[in-house]
Amino acid sequence: MPDDRPTSRRELRAAERTRQRAAEEAARREAELRAEQERAAQQPEPTSAQEAQDPGAEPPRPEASERGTGAAPGPDGGTGPPDGEPVRPADEATGEAAAGADEEARDEAGENGAGSASATAEHPHPATAAPAAGDRRTPAEANDPFSQIFGTEDDPRAERVGRPVRERGQRRRGPRIGGIVVVLVALLAIGGAGLAGWSFFGERIQEVLGLRDDDFEGEGDGTEVQFTILPGDTGTDVGVRLAEAGIVKTSDAFVRAILARPEEPSFIPGTYTMEQRMSSASALVRLLDDSNRMEHTVMIPEGTVAADVFVLVERSLDIPVAELEEAAADPQSFGLPEEADSLEGFLFPATYTFEPDVDARTVLETMVARMDQALAEHGVAAEDRWDVIRLAALVEKEARLPDDFPKVARVFLNRIDEGMLLQSDATVTYDTGNTHRVTTTDDERANADNPYNTYVHPGLPIGPISNPGDRAIDAAVNPADGPWLYFVSVNLDTGETVFSETYEQHLEAVDRWLAWMEENPGWDE
């Protein structure tokens, strides 16, 4: 099934913001509903005198501490400040200052006859001034567990949830823990809605109480382990495997460490020395330290012959060539066609990263499997693999420029169709072992004992002469359209190649190549 996990820093941040907004919106709506229910239950009945004066008048509005997006009971169970203490108006959900709310309340009083948050005959205490721009919380709010959990209007992590606002200097009615206990009891009391609330605010509650425990502390417990970042790994992939290995406690903590960095980190494939039980921040620093990366990566260029592949593996992975040759002795055990007498042609050229203790067999199996994948991606049927690989390997050795690969493939196919010898110098040098040469001698081209020599043996060579990459495979499967029967590279520095239909045209191009070789002596030494 598809993997829907976020794969980049931007996606991780977007997912986190989406989760927070959903949680905040649900909590806000739930708080508004509870506040409306409480206000309805606490609304005083009109007196007979009030009914006589204005039977159709609205009941008095609640005080300013209950206005806004809806008031919720405070940690002490009350709905506002005690009698006789100043009333501080709550900010509106839109974030307007208290002075604006006060003026709005006076306007409403003039229109509806309702009570105002400002000093009136009904409310003799004037409203306090709105705090300055910035953090609008009073010191009491800063220590308020509700403020800690739900955030404030200016808190970028959450929208403000309506609740009573303490006046500066007002005595707290219980410690923070007591307030949290009230929250937890309330969540349990309202059943399913409480569970939903916990799912939204549980992490924040645990953070306020210091209970969140999804990360280790420090730089590890001293137990060294090796961890490998694979090509294409995302931060989430790395975090999941780090947690599985016991290096970090949770992948979520590791993702948070990534998001805390000012720039998105770039993970380089390789094996790194780590420790068990590291904090996520420490683990991330260790993985981004180039000096901590162990060299267990090998790069195989396109067109490299198997003998040179073994040398590159020995240098990079410290696996002796003899062990690689022994592991490669039975090509059919790797699933190769019956015609294959070696792994030549089936070791896909790419950059590979292995575990430090990898063995020869695993290295070769990995490369063969990657070639199988490439052939499948190009739509090569099992019965066609041998012919496609032989042609692709020949094209890989002869073509110079990317646009020339399909044309070189077409030249060889046209010559086969015409019953002509392929006459490729690359097939001659392959059997000699000197595969880096671009020229051959008359004797070498006339040597019929060389089974790969296409100057004397018709058709494709008896086996692949290199390990081709994607471009050469694609050219073998999708050759260009054209009548060419000859080609020659006339400038080995630039790769310029001339394609010809007739032998006369080809000879002219060969003269250009010989002239270039004279001007650039030592090229073929």
Image (spheres, rainbow, N blue to C red):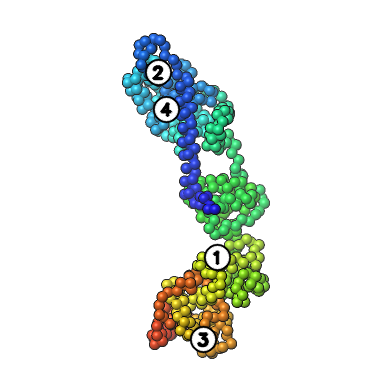
Q: Which residue is mark 4?
A: 68
Q: Is residue 480 visible?
A: yes
Q: Is residue 326 left or right of residue 413?
A: right
Q: Residues within 10 Å of mark 3 (few under 14, many from 20)?
A: many
Q: Residue at image x 52%, y 72%?
A: 468
Camera-nearest residue between 296 and 358:
358
**Element at label 2:** loop
Q: Is residue 51 above or below residue 300?
A: above
Residue at label 1?
A: 373
Front residue (pair 287, 423): 423
Give the mark nearest the N terminus, 4 or 3: 4
| Label 2 with label 1: CB-CB less than 8 Å | no
Q: Identify the amino acid type marked 2.
A: Pro
Within 10 Å of disc 2 (Cα), the crowding (few <14, some 14-19, many 20+) is some
Between discs 2 and 4, the one toward the N terminus:
2
Crowding near pointer 4: few (<14 within 10 Å), some, many (20+)? some
Q: What residue did someone put label 2 on?
A: 60
Residue linked to disc 3 = 455
Q: Secondary structure at mark 4?
A: loop
Disc number lying in front (2 or 4): 2
Question: CB of mark 1 within 8 Å of CB of mark 3?
Answer: no
Q: Residue at x 64, y 49 (%)?
A: 246
* Amino acid residing under circle 4: Gly
Q: Earlier in the sequence, mark 3 or mark 2?
A: 2
Q: In this rendering, is residue 363 above or below 276?
A: below
**Disc on the earlier residue, 1 or 4:** 4
Q: Amino acid at mark 1?
A: Gln
State how far apart marks 1 and 3 are (Cα): 33 Å
Nearest to viewer (mark 1 / mark 4) = 1
Say what secondary structure mark 1 lies in.
helix
Q: In the figure, 191 relative to 402: above or below?
A: above
